[in-house]
Image (tube, coloured by chain):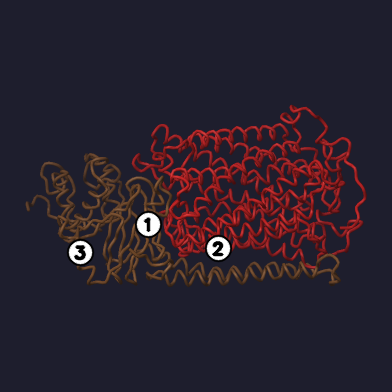
Amino acid sequence: MTTQPVHTLPPKNYLNAKETVASWFFTHDHKRIALLYLASITFFFFIGGIAAMLMRLELIHPRGYLFTSDTYNKLFTMHGVIMVWFFLIPAIPNVLGNFLLPLMIGAKDLAFPRLNLISWYVFMFGGLFAVASILFGGVDTGWTFYTPYSSTYSNGWVIAMAVGIFINGFSSIFTGLNFIVTTHKLRAPGMTWFRLPLFVWTLYSTSLIFVLATPVLAITLFLVALERLFGVGIFDPHLGGDPLLFQHLFWFYSHPAVYIMVLPAMGVVSELMAAFARKRIFGYNFIVYASLGIAFLGFLVWGHHMFVSGESIYAGMIFSLLSFFVAVPSAIKVFNWTATLYKGTITFDTPLLYALGFVALFTIGGMTGLMLASLAVDVHVTQTYFVVAHFHYIMVGGAVMAYLGGMHYWFPKITGRMYPETLARWSAVILFVGFNMTFFPQFILGYMGMPRRYHVYPEEFQMLNVISTLGTPLLGIGYMLPLGYLGWASFFGRIAGPNPWRAPGLEWQTSSPPPEHNFSAIPVVTTGPYAYDLLPDGSKSFTESDDGG
Amino acid sequence: MSFQPLPYEDSTYAAPVDTIFVLLTTLCSVITLAIFAVIIFFCIRYRRGSSADRTPGPPKKEQKIMEYSWTIIPLVLFLFLFVWAADVYYNMFSPPADGIPIYVIGKQWMWKMEHPEGEREIDQLHIPVDRQIILTLTSQDVIHDFDVPAFRIKHDVLPGRYVRMWFKATKVGTYYLFCGQYCGALHSQMIGQIIVMTAADYAKWLDEAGATTSGSLAGEGSRYFHELGCSGCHENSKVVQAPSLAGIYGEPVPLESGQMVTADDDYLRDSILLPGKQIARGFQNIMPSYQGLVSEEQIVALIAYIRSERNTPAPTAGSTP
């Protein structure tokens, strides 16, 4: 890296503007709320992570000596529920999105700052129910809550957990609403729709899903509670209900929910690719339409979770075909990121390593998704470890890699300080290796036929299970290291200055950390978001295209 | 007891499923590795400090052509595989007319199998090699899943309805039967075995197992038909108006609502448990529900009995047998 001018922290910024504890818990500042979310989801991530470690430890031995079946079932339920609703879904939108959306479009805050704070309280209140249901004895339904097991047969704290998720959903809806209105109404002068950074486009697409899909989940859980508490026959055939109805409703939400996790990750990766290739993103318009296309098509493929569930085989064929189509916009993005590197001036700082890790793991996850979309193949591998591996490549390999990449990239903006670069690079590599070692063997296990959610299993599956478990310490180190050094660097890192990456985005045109209201004066936008060539110290000049591309 | 290693090609589905899988894996790997290779090449060539040529890239029009070609060409290749996979899938769940019908009832946490000759098994299913096996699956409680990886078949087993699928085992051996859908505490112990035997061994097994049964499934159903009081109304009674069930199986039934349904397993099951759901034309809704009074096994036997009577002509009204 070239020699940096010596910077100092701005004397007044959002972190020290007010210093009481109450000023944090009653803040309306989107940046502070983002940090409240950061602390909360990090806490939940480690709860969910510990459950996963215990499960992997258990699976070293085919007879499962460590826990009873019941405990094991509660562990995977806890892992799923916590990771999906209390970490993955809020991770990028509520931490990075909350922090960056107003900064990126040149606004002082979100449209509804109080609603933003309420959404965090609602989130925590939901979390309270989820944690309480775990502490009181847990739930053993799996995060999918399939009926009639969840509504009639399970003995766990299903209602408490369902209430937690029900409440949690409102925090998603509030955030989605807030982001949509903010993007429509609070763009700075000159910030046209096609000058929006791609991260903003993906947040916008994600918010549409938040608002349209989450109510369906709330209704579904409400119906489960109605049947469980009052015996109203909705899903249990002995009461005159239909168990498949639950799966249709559940996946109508939960498939789009996968895109809630992945779309913002794609947005982050688009920013990182451009920043570290120091180039305009290739095919800006295609990426924008791909994001909206994913948000739309994501609502039409829920039935691909149900090819062997008893849905009609003709429905299965339609859902299979649509699932092939939904792969198209994702593929467009991967090709465009690759093309962005072409003729770039690439530096391999930590955020780019994470972004490249994302592309690799997301591509593998996406390709195996196509295998799962192929009907006859799905019959063999669905509900096995093949599916487990597939969605971890998308949701952990994809979403979490992008989240960490984004955390490193915007860390100097959030804290005003730099993280230790060498350690961070090693940490990214360790995570990548640990992830593949943990999850790649599971593809093979799945094709060999090992069903998921098995606490004991036939001996011929042991070898691959042991390899998978051996990957988890690496994975754990890959997660613990950033927690340690980012925590340290928040207080002791080198002062970063306003724009350490020399990036053109609006968020970099204010001090680091930003002042309470983001900008000393509302900026006026005259170029697209990736005008690296127009920067005074941009290393190369491009004149190939107009605003967006 | 020795199991075959997995996933062995031991049913007629194994070859097509594996072929599609290998083609998919090849196609996906080629694309993935090509992307990785290009990324790595760009990363090295265009690293900061390299002297690579960075004059502006292709003009906008060429960019668009690239965007469309890298979108459409892979899609067409994949659609070809979609059609093939859909065809195999359709086949799996469209049973042929002839084959050995086996009823499977799942419950927490065991599998109950019923052969047409009346043999019953728990967590085991003996079948002959190279014969079409037609499974009718149902559950007594929660959703289970009949999953035999070696045969590449799997389908959820739902309470309250029958699912049908079929396969043909091509090799003698013992294979895992897993429960593939999470069903509660001992889900992972709901494991059975499928024992595929030569025709001769199977005939011998039927003889031995048959010695302990009290006749065929249909015969048993006939007994229930009388014991449970079905015959009182449905066997030519002059007192109560109820449709005769002789010869009804597989035939269209006109309903009071004006619709037509086929008298298949699901219709018969519903008519026993939810008699008010579909009323046969010309009759009144007077039959009481047997919900809670008959077990899934008894229903299966009753259906087998009604099916066995399918070639008996329906008696004309007023005649006595």
* Residue type indicated by callout 1: Phe
User: Which residue sits at x=72%, y=65%?
Assistant: A338
Examine the rendered structure and indicate whether residue B14 appears above or below residue A292: below
Circle 3 sits on which residue?
B206
Chain designation of label 3: B
Looking at the figure, which quarter contains the N terminus of chain A?
Answer: bottom right
Would you say A521 lies left or right of A257 here?
right
Secondary structure under tag 1 reads strand
Depth check, front residue: B48 or A432: A432
Q: Which mark is residue B146?
A: 1
Q: Where is residue A18 in the image (x, y as percent from the top left)?
A: 81, 30
Rendered image quadrant of residue A28:
top right
Q: Position of residue B63 (x, y in %)?
A: 75, 68
Query: Are discs 2 and 3 both within one chain?
Result: no
Name the front one of labels 2 and 1.
1
Examine the rendered structure and indicate whether residue A339 appears above or below residue A389: below
Circle 2 sits on which residue?
A370
